[in-house]
């Protein structure tokens, strides 16, 4: 029972450290375990799922912060692209930046939808086993 609790505590801390961007060597040193043990802790399906959740939450928070400033950034690019006094190269660069950002957002949304669909299919297959 105590061993299980120690394992859970180590696994939880390993996930926290990995979510902060630390590698397995640093995680192993922090936990006082071998690098291989740290790798096994993070490879556990429950820990891997928890790590993805933590990383996803951090990414969403970062995205929300970036989106809060997106209207200002887009307006700056729009003004630069529309400014007849600006050099043509600057106007083209601003327009290109806006289009590139739009394409990246569309690709990200498409990829996210596809991954969610695949995850749902995998989960359905697991339930059927």
Image (cartoon, rainbow, N blue to C red):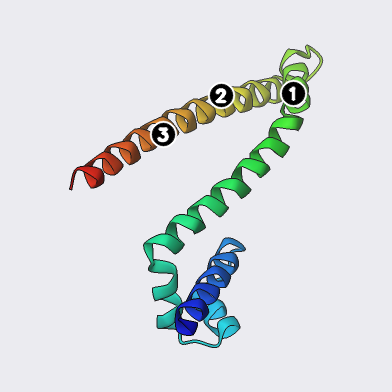
- Report the front residue among 116 and 68: 116
Residue 44 point in image, percent of width and height: 38, 67
Report the residue marked by disc 2. 102
Residue at 58% in and 71% down: 13
Q: Residues within 10 Å of mark 1 (few under 14, many from 20)?
A: few
Find numbered disc 2 in the image and state the secondary structure of the residue it sits on: helix
Q: Are marks 3 and 2 in contact (CB under 8 Å)?
A: no
Name the N-terminal-most of marks 1 and 3: 1
13 relative to 104, above or below: below
Q: Nearer the viewer, residue 72 or 49?
A: 49
> Up-down: is 25 above or below 92?
below
User: Front-most of 126 and 33?
Assistant: 126
Against 106, is 43 above or below?
below
Residue holding disc 3: 111
Direction from residue 117 to residue 37 in the image, left or right? right
| Precedes in sequence: disc 3 or disc 2 | 2
Q: Position of residue 11 (x, y in %)?
A: 50, 72
């Amino acid at each position: 029972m105590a061993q299980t609790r120690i394992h859970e505590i180590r696994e939880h801390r390993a996930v926290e450290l990995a979510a902060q961007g630390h590698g397995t060597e640093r995680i192993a040193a922090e936990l006082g375990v071998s690098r291989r043990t740290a790798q096994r802790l993070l490879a556990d399906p429950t820990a891997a799922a928890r790590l993805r959740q933590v990383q996803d939450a951090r990414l969403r928070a970062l995205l929300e912060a970036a989106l809060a400033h997106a209207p200002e950034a887009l307006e700056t690019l729009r003004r630069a692209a529309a400014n007849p006094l600006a050099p043509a190269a600057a106007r083209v660069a601003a327009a290109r930046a806006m289009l590139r950002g739009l394409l990246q957002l569309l690709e990200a949304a498409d990829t996210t939808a596809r991954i969610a669909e695949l995850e749902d299919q995998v989960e359905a297959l697991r339930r059927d086993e």
